[in-house]
Protein backbone atom coordinates (compact mmCIF):
# COMPACT_ATOMS: atom_id res chain seq x y z
CA UNK A 1 0.00 0.00 0.00
CA UNK A 2 1.26 3.44 -0.94
CA UNK A 3 1.16 5.85 2.02
CA UNK A 4 1.79 9.60 1.91
CA UNK A 5 2.67 11.22 5.23
CA UNK A 6 1.97 14.93 5.47
CA UNK A 7 -0.69 17.59 5.96
CA UNK A 8 -2.60 18.78 2.90
CA UNK A 9 -1.94 22.44 3.74
CA UNK A 10 1.73 21.91 2.80
CA UNK A 11 2.47 22.85 -0.82
CA UNK A 12 5.08 20.10 -0.98
CA UNK A 13 2.57 17.50 0.16
CA UNK A 14 0.07 18.80 -2.39
CA UNK A 15 2.62 18.26 -5.17
CA UNK A 16 2.73 14.58 -4.28
CA UNK A 17 -1.03 14.21 -3.80
CA UNK A 18 -1.70 15.90 -7.13
CA UNK A 19 0.79 13.57 -8.82
CA UNK A 20 -0.91 10.56 -7.24
CA UNK A 21 -4.28 11.74 -8.51
CA UNK A 22 -2.95 12.43 -12.02
CA UNK A 23 -1.64 8.85 -12.04
CA UNK A 24 -4.93 7.51 -10.60
CA UNK A 25 -3.04 5.79 -7.77
CA UNK A 26 -4.59 4.22 -4.71
CA UNK A 27 -2.96 5.63 -1.60
CA UNK A 28 -3.51 6.39 2.05
CA UNK A 29 -2.70 9.80 3.49
CA UNK A 30 -1.58 10.18 7.08
CA UNK A 31 -1.68 13.75 8.39
CA UNK A 32 1.61 14.83 9.92
CA UNK A 33 2.95 18.31 10.55
CA UNK A 34 1.59 21.58 11.94
CA UNK A 35 -1.77 20.99 13.57
CA UNK A 36 -1.48 17.23 13.28
CA UNK A 37 0.96 14.57 14.49
CA UNK A 38 4.34 16.20 15.27
CA UNK A 39 7.24 15.37 12.98
CA UNK A 40 10.03 16.10 15.49
CA UNK A 41 9.65 12.66 17.05
CA UNK A 42 11.86 9.56 16.89
CA UNK A 43 9.07 7.74 15.04
CA UNK A 44 8.87 10.25 12.20
CA UNK A 45 12.55 11.13 12.09
CA UNK A 46 13.37 7.47 11.56
CA UNK A 47 11.64 7.98 8.22
CA UNK A 48 12.97 11.47 7.48
CA UNK A 49 15.77 12.85 9.68
CA UNK A 50 14.87 16.38 8.52
CA UNK A 51 11.48 16.09 10.29
CA UNK A 52 9.76 17.47 7.20
CA UNK A 53 6.78 16.36 5.12
CA UNK A 54 6.06 14.74 2.75
CA UNK A 55 7.32 11.22 3.24
CA UNK A 56 6.29 8.34 1.00
CA UNK A 57 6.14 4.73 2.16
CA UNK A 58 5.65 1.80 -0.17
CA UNK A 59 6.19 -1.39 1.77
CA UNK A 60 9.73 -1.17 3.15
CA UNK A 61 10.67 1.57 0.69
CA UNK A 62 10.74 5.07 2.20
CA UNK A 63 11.36 8.28 0.27
CA UNK A 64 11.42 11.98 1.14
CA UNK A 65 11.87 15.23 -0.84
CA UNK A 66 8.70 16.17 -2.68
CA UNK A 67 10.06 16.51 -6.23
CA UNK A 68 11.95 13.23 -5.86
CA UNK A 69 8.78 11.48 -4.75
CA UNK A 70 6.93 12.91 -7.74
CA UNK A 71 9.67 11.71 -10.10
CA UNK A 72 9.62 8.24 -8.57
CA UNK A 73 5.86 7.91 -8.93
CA UNK A 74 5.94 9.15 -12.53
CA UNK A 75 8.80 6.79 -13.36
CA UNK A 76 6.87 3.81 -12.01
CA UNK A 77 3.85 4.75 -14.16
CA UNK A 78 5.44 5.91 -17.43
CA UNK A 79 2.26 5.35 -19.43
CA UNK A 80 0.84 8.59 -18.00
CA UNK A 81 3.56 10.66 -19.66
CA UNK A 82 4.22 12.95 -16.70
CA UNK A 83 7.96 12.37 -17.11
CA UNK A 84 9.02 11.88 -20.75
CA UNK A 85 11.04 8.86 -21.78
CA UNK A 86 13.16 10.82 -24.24
CA UNK A 87 16.28 12.00 -22.35
CA UNK A 88 16.25 15.53 -23.75
CA UNK A 89 12.55 16.07 -23.14
CA UNK A 90 12.92 14.64 -19.65
CA UNK A 91 15.84 16.96 -18.95
CA UNK A 92 13.67 19.99 -19.77
CA UNK A 93 11.01 18.83 -17.31
CA UNK A 94 13.56 18.18 -14.57
CA UNK A 95 15.30 21.50 -15.27
CA UNK A 96 12.11 23.42 -14.49
CA UNK A 97 11.43 21.25 -11.42
CA UNK A 98 14.92 22.03 -10.11
CA UNK A 99 14.41 25.73 -10.87
CA UNK A 100 11.27 25.63 -8.75
CA UNK A 101 13.15 24.15 -5.80
CA UNK A 102 16.09 26.52 -6.12
CA UNK A 103 15.67 29.95 -7.68
CA UNK A 104 11.91 30.26 -7.29
CA UNK A 105 11.61 28.99 -3.71
CA UNK A 106 14.50 31.14 -2.51
CA UNK A 107 12.81 34.20 -4.00
CA UNK A 108 9.44 33.91 -2.25
CA UNK A 109 10.42 32.67 1.18
CA UNK A 110 10.70 35.97 3.10
CA UNK A 111 7.66 37.77 1.72
CA UNK A 112 5.44 34.68 1.89
CA UNK A 113 6.35 33.89 5.48
CA UNK A 114 5.86 37.52 6.52
CA UNK A 115 2.54 38.05 4.74
CA UNK A 116 0.91 34.63 5.16
CA UNK A 117 2.59 33.10 8.19
CA UNK A 118 3.28 36.29 10.18
CA UNK A 119 6.92 35.21 10.61
CA UNK A 120 8.62 37.42 11.51
CA UNK A 121 5.81 39.37 13.20
CA UNK A 122 7.58 42.66 12.43
CA UNK A 123 9.20 42.10 9.01
CA UNK A 124 12.12 44.14 7.74
CA UNK A 125 10.71 46.39 4.96
CA UNK A 126 13.96 46.21 2.97
CA UNK A 127 14.00 42.41 3.02
CA UNK A 128 10.28 42.34 2.30
CA UNK A 129 10.66 44.54 -0.78
CA UNK A 130 13.68 42.59 -2.00
CA UNK A 131 11.86 39.26 -1.69
CA UNK A 132 8.77 40.60 -3.45
CA UNK A 133 10.90 41.99 -6.30
CA UNK A 134 12.83 38.74 -6.64
CA UNK A 135 9.66 36.62 -6.61
CA UNK A 136 8.05 38.77 -9.30
CA UNK A 137 11.20 38.53 -11.39
CA UNK A 138 11.15 34.74 -11.24
CA UNK A 139 7.49 34.65 -12.19
CA UNK A 140 8.25 36.86 -15.19
CA UNK A 141 10.68 34.15 -16.32
CA UNK A 142 7.90 31.57 -16.06
CA UNK A 143 5.52 33.93 -17.88
CA UNK A 144 7.96 34.20 -20.79
CA UNK A 145 8.24 30.42 -20.95
CA UNK A 146 4.50 29.68 -21.09
CA UNK A 147 4.02 32.57 -23.51
CA UNK A 148 6.54 30.85 -25.79
CA UNK A 149 4.93 27.39 -25.55
CA UNK A 150 1.32 28.69 -25.49
CA UNK A 151 0.49 25.51 -23.62
CA UNK A 152 2.40 23.86 -20.76
CA UNK A 153 5.78 24.67 -19.23
CA UNK A 154 7.86 22.43 -21.48
CA UNK A 155 5.60 22.26 -24.52
CA UNK A 156 2.34 20.74 -25.69
CA UNK A 157 2.14 18.04 -23.01
CA UNK A 158 1.26 18.39 -19.32
CA UNK A 159 4.13 17.09 -17.14
CA UNK A 160 5.44 17.04 -13.59
CA UNK A 161 6.85 20.51 -14.19
CA UNK A 162 3.30 21.82 -14.46
CA UNK A 163 2.30 20.25 -11.15
CA UNK A 164 5.13 21.76 -9.12
CA UNK A 165 5.15 25.12 -10.92
CA UNK A 166 1.37 25.34 -11.12
CA UNK A 167 1.09 25.10 -7.35
CA UNK A 168 3.88 27.67 -7.02
CA UNK A 169 1.94 29.97 -9.34
CA UNK A 170 -1.15 29.53 -7.16
CA UNK A 171 0.88 30.53 -4.10
CA UNK A 172 2.11 33.68 -5.88
CA UNK A 173 -1.43 34.66 -6.87
CA UNK A 174 -2.81 34.10 -3.36
CA UNK A 175 -0.10 36.03 -1.48
CA UNK A 176 -1.07 39.66 -0.67
CA UNK A 177 1.61 41.66 -2.46
CA UNK A 178 2.18 43.79 -5.54
CA UNK A 179 2.33 41.78 -8.75
CA UNK A 180 2.95 42.80 -12.37
CA UNK A 181 0.37 41.96 -15.01
CA UNK A 182 1.48 38.70 -16.64
CA UNK A 183 -1.19 37.67 -19.17
CA UNK A 184 0.54 34.46 -20.25
CA UNK A 185 0.60 33.25 -16.64
CA UNK A 186 -3.08 34.14 -16.23
CA UNK A 187 -3.95 32.03 -19.28
CA UNK A 188 -1.71 29.21 -18.05
CA UNK A 189 -3.42 29.25 -14.65
CA UNK A 190 -6.81 29.00 -16.36
CA UNK A 191 -5.60 25.92 -18.27
CA UNK A 192 -4.35 24.37 -15.05
CA UNK A 193 -7.64 24.98 -13.26
CA UNK A 194 -9.48 23.08 -16.00
CA UNK A 195 -7.77 19.91 -14.77
CA UNK A 196 -9.85 18.52 -11.87
CA UNK A 197 -6.79 16.99 -10.22
CA UNK A 198 -5.00 20.33 -10.14
CA UNK A 199 -8.06 22.35 -9.10
CA UNK A 200 -8.43 20.14 -6.03
CA UNK A 201 -5.07 21.32 -4.71
CA UNK A 202 -5.15 24.94 -5.84
CA UNK A 203 -7.72 26.55 -3.59
CA UNK A 204 -7.64 29.92 -1.89
CA UNK A 205 -7.27 28.54 1.62
CA UNK A 206 -4.03 26.77 0.61
CA UNK A 207 -1.55 29.33 -0.66
Image: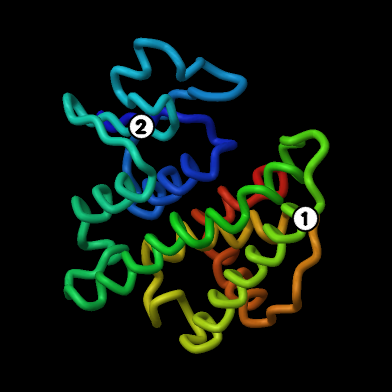
Please state which of residues 31 and 132 is positioned toward the viewer in this rendering.
132
51 sits to left or right of 2: right
Relative to 87, is 34 above or below? Answer: above
Judging by the rendered image, the residue that carries numbered circle 1 is 126
Relative to 133, is 34 above or below? Answer: above
Q: Position of residue 8 (x, y in %)?
A: 54, 35
Identified at 77% across, 45% down, the residue is: 115
Outermost residue toward the bottom in this view: 148
Q: Position of residue 50 (x, y in %)?
A: 39, 28
Identified at 39% across, 81% down, the residue is: 155
Q: Position of residue 9 (x, y in %)?
A: 59, 36
Identified at 65% across, 44% down, the residue is: 206
Judging by the rendered image, the residue that carries numbered circle 2 is 55
Residue 177: image quadrant is: bottom right
Query: Which type of secondary structure does the marked residue at label 2 adopt?
Result: strand
Q: Earlier in the sequence, mark 1 or mark 2?
A: 2
Please state which of residues 45 and 207 is positioned toward the viewer in this rendering.
45
Residue 62: image quadrant is: top left
Name the image quarter holding the N terminus.
top left
Amino acid sequence: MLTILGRSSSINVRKVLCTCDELALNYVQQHWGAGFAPTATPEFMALNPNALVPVMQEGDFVLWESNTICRYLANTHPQAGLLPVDPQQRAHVEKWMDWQLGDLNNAWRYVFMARLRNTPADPDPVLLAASEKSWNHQMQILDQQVDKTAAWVTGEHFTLADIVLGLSLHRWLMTPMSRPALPALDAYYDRLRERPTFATYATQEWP
